[in-house]
Amino acid sequence: MSYPSRQRLIGWLAAGLLALATPALAQQGEPIEVEADRLELDDRAGTAVYSGEVDIRQGNLHLTGARVEIQRNDAGEVSRLTATGERAYLEQNPADGERVQGWGRTIIYHAAERRVELIDRAELHRGADTFNGAYVEYQIDRRLVEARASTEGTDRQRVRMTLTPEQQ
């Protein structure tokens, strides 16, 4: 791989992972670790696609899936990350907040909106609380969870939640 191509690849990785972090928890100085069987980078289309047991880590962030696609907008900023697989996984362990874990056959992170969609066999753990269904959406800044029993292309999966009372 040529030096300019390597720089573009590193830029893609950094931008994709930093988009996952909350502003207060940005991992700018942290190393990025990516493992995958294959990478397809298309600068013109603004996409990077990793496939084959993809495992991405940076600081307190962890994203896995059989396939992970990073899309950039016209300004070159990461706009969306999509992880797919039998059980794609997203985790963040902030030092000053609740641990968030999410699973689904598809996980879509909308960077500008700071919103995560978990689709098909969706499951979200936020601290001690859990939410399950065909579709679970989590708005990070608002700490808002929406769950549905069905969504396009999935079987009906009843919404279930477990809310744990705070300890006094």
Image (cartoon, rainbow, N blue to C red):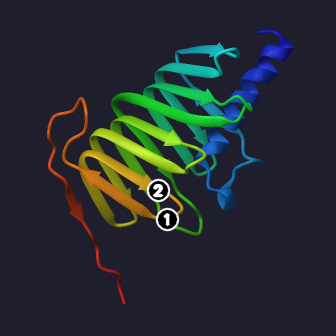
**Amino acid type of the residue that numbered disc 2 sits on in the rendered structure:** Gln
Residue located beneath label 1 in the image: 142
x%, y% of residue 110? Answer: 53, 42
The residue that appears at 53% across and 25% down in the rendered structure is 69
The residue that appears at 59% across and 28% down in the rendered structure is 71
- Answer above or below: position of 91 versus 53: below
Judged from the image, the secondary structure of the residue bearing numbered disc 1 is loop
Of residues 118 and 92, the one drawn nearer to the viewer in this rendering: 118
x%, y% of residue 9? Answer: 72, 22
Of residues 30 and 75, the one drawn nearer to the viewer in this rendering: 75
- Answer above or below: position of 162 versus 80: below
Q: Quadrant of residue 56?
A: top right
x%, y% of residue 26? Answer: 69, 53
State the residue lying farthest toward the bottom.
168
Task: Please rate how many residues cluster around mark 2, counting C-alpha atoms within 10 Å: few if below 14, some from 14 to 19, many from 20.
Answer: some
- Is 37 on the left-hand or right-hand side of 34? left
The residue that appears at 78% across and 15% down in the rendered structure is 5
Task: Please rate how many residues cluster around mark 1, counting C-alpha atoms within 10 Å: few if below 14, some from 14 to 19, many from 20.
Answer: few
**Amino acid type of the residue that numbered disc 1 sits on in the rendered structure:** Arg
Q: Are marks 1 and 2 in contact (CB under 8 Å)?
A: yes
Residue located beneath label 2 in the image: 139
